[in-house]
Amino acid sequence: MPAKKVLITGITGQDGSYLADYLLSLGYEVHGVVRRVALEDQRHRMWRINHIADKIKFHSGSLESYPSIFKIIEKVQPEECYHLAAQSFVTYSFEDEFSTLNANINGTHYVLSALQSVAPGCRFYFAASSEMFGRAEEVPQRETTKFHPRSVYGISKVAGFDLTRNYREAYDMYAVSGILFNHESPRRGYEFVTRKITSTAAAIKLGKAGKLYLGNLDAKRDWGHAGEYVKAMHSMLQQDVPEDYVIGTGETHSVREFADLAFKCLDMDYERYVEIDQNFFRPAEVDLLVADPSKAKKELSWEYNISFEDLVTEMVKSDYDHLSKA
Ligand code: G4F
């Protein structure tokens, strides 16, 4: 039987790279949409997938251009499509609301519309987010929890979620959203708080930095490991009936706890090195996120077994090892 064809947008990002690893291990023919600039500077821009680059078929395209997405989908004829590409940094969405909305809403709409036109049988996954819950009305948050986004990023994800639902209902497409809570790893971008903490703590330990400047230490997030979350994405596209799922650990920890543990991994006290910088506070904050992943556990048989301590330790160790050699 020929290998199943999958198309991933955002394949150079943290989730795209783990998903590509996973789908290759399952025998898929993996296609990825990448920007032309990434293909021209593979070493730097594709560092997360350089180890598997020779096994992936790349297609140069932009999520800002409907014709380019249409052409790729028409040519590849994927059986599964994971739409992960987005402006995913919440802070930046306060600085540039308009481009966040354009990229995140139009990008999703273009992929859905092109699939409907030229590959309607393709199963579609949308990367929704726990940011959609925002000022959540219930704790923990589940599939039925009302959305109250607190950023333009969150609003763009609610729009993507609704577009996905509408293509499912209106055109009978297998289109689902994974409502993923924060997921981290050594491949996380440096702008997100976890990687900022682990990389700076490692740099301080090695004498390459002096202080770590952070914003709100009291915000609480449900932090899991990205490598495990991509398995849930895949599973969502293998069901008999297309449905949306919440994916998270069911545990919540503050930014302060994360910093405390990260510095402790290196035998340091975070209070000596962390300084509060008002510039890192957001105009509107999401104070507390914690998932109820029981539907995914029951229906997808998705199991998550990595502790918060193991996640932080893995990230710190990776940054320390990497910086030691730099
Ligand atoms: O690491 P963050 O920037 O992640 P955030 O905003 O929770 O969003 C991430 O998770 C979402 C899933 O819920 C994704 F949809 C989204 O794409 C992204 O992956 O910030 C986490 C918390 C916030 O409360 C923030 O205010 O950390 C707080 N924080 C405190 N100091 C900081 C900092 N965040 C950043 N980025 N940098 C700081 O210095």
Image: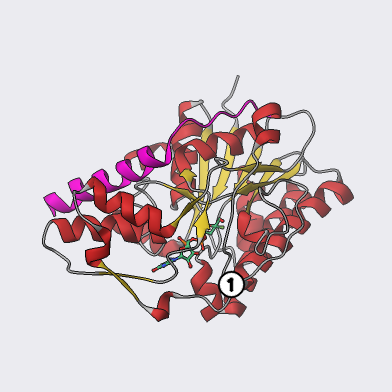
> How far across and down, in percent of the image, does residue 162 sit?
77, 58
Q: Is residue 320 magenta?
A: yes
According to the image, label 1 marks what residue?
100
Quarter of the image for the N terminus: give it.
top right
Q: Say which amino acid is labelled 1.
A: Thr
Of residues 304 and 166, the one nearer the viewer is 304
**Residue drawn where x is 20% and y is 54% of the image:** 268
> How far across and down, in percent of the image, does residue 239 sit?
73, 29
**Residue drawn where x is 80% and y is 43% of the image:** 173
Of residues 301 and 74, the one nearer the viewer is 301
**Colour mapping used in the image:** secondary structure
Task: State which region is magenta.
Answer: 300-326
Q: Is residue 213 above or below residue 292?
A: below
**Residue drawn where x is 22% and y is 65% of the image:** 272
Q: Is residue 110 above or below residue 28?
A: below
Residue 286, by quadrant, is: bottom right
Q: Is residue 153 magenta?
A: no
Left or right? Give the position of 293 relative to 48: right
Mark 1 element type:
helix
